[in-house]
Amino acid sequence: MKFLITVLICLLFPFYGFCEELKVACAASFILPMKEISKSFEKKNNVKVIVSFGSTGMLYNQIKNYDSYDIFFAADTVIPERLVNTGAGKDFFLYARGKAVLWTKAENLKNLEHFEDVLQNSKSISIALPQAAPYGKAAYDYLKEKGLLSKYKDKLFIGKNVFQSFQYAFTGLTDSGFCALSQALSEKGKTGVYFFLDECRSVIHGGCILESKKAAYDFVEYVKKSKDIFKKYGYEKP
């Protein structure tokens, strides 16, 4: 009976508010596409999508401490799989593949040819906390594998997530910064230039359903099918 009343209210008063809310935890690297996708989903489904952004590690800790979310969109696969394996998550899914890049808008660095030239001529370089942010870890591991970490470690300026790492470089707090390709392709990102990291591993984005709601499953499928937005921000299929 309660369900029938809810349906009738939604049909009779569609413009007086949303019928349902979805609470979403989303990795900071996916801020821009998630904002666009969630707005589009809201308009078509009369479901309010409330998104909290942060590093994958920070959001994981929130979920472990029983913060209420319906879906978790992480920037790696290990953590959402762990939630499913421990019973905190319901269903694991993959949704995107991204790349870490080095970005700068400093005039003395924009015309350099190679990312290592940018590192060498930067007085400070921002990077997301590797222990919490998968894009920060990808960049950090890449520097280590290439034998560059010891050379540039003293220049690194740590941000709590990849969005903050980009903001440090964008505001000039650092000369350059490691970020997600999606941020480099944003309107703010277009004020500078980005450099691909040769042979740096891709960042696979996975997630999990936390509460078994039909709207949650519908939203995940909607995200996966948002091909134009993925392409706009440089994401590929996982």
Image (cartoon, helix red, strand yellow):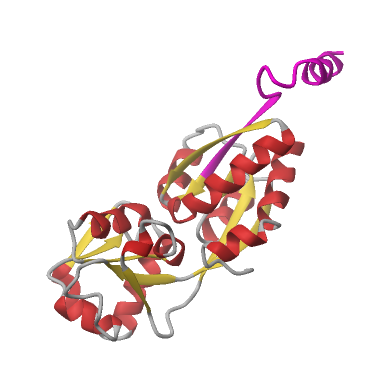
Residue 158 on image: x %, y %: 24, 58
Residue 226: quarter of image: bottom right
In this orientation, which residue lies closer to the viewer: 180 or 143? 180
Quadrant where the image shows the C terminus? bottom right
Residue 94: quarter of image: bottom right
Quick check: can you spot residue 177?
yes
Quadrant where the image shows the N terminus? top right
In this orientation, which residue lies closer to the viewer: 30 or 153? 30
Q: Name the residue located 67 percent from the left edge and 41 percent from the top edge.
A: 41
On screen, 3 above or below 145? Answer: above
Residue 196 on image: x %, y %: 39, 78
User: Does residue 97 appear to the left or right of 100 in the view shown?
Assistant: right
Residue 9: quarter of image: top right
Residue 155 on image: x %, y %: 15, 69
Query: What span is in magenta?
Result: 1-25
User: Does residue 17 appear to the left or right of 195 in the view shown?
Assistant: right
In this orientation, which residue lies closer to the viewer: 133 or 18? 18
On screen, 118 above or below 124? Answer: below
Residue 88 on image: x %, y %: 60, 43
Q: Name the residue located 45 percent from the left edge and 52 percent from the top edge.
A: 56
Task: Count the numbered circles shown.
Answer: 0
Q: Is residue 16 magenta?
A: yes
Q: Is residue 237 magenta?
A: no
Q: Name the residue located 83 percent from the left edge and 13 percent from the top edge.
A: 5
User: Does residue 54 appear to the left or right of 218 in the view shown?
Assistant: left
Quick check: can you spot residue 212?
no
On screen, 129 above or below 200? Answer: above
On screen, 158 above or below 115? Answer: above
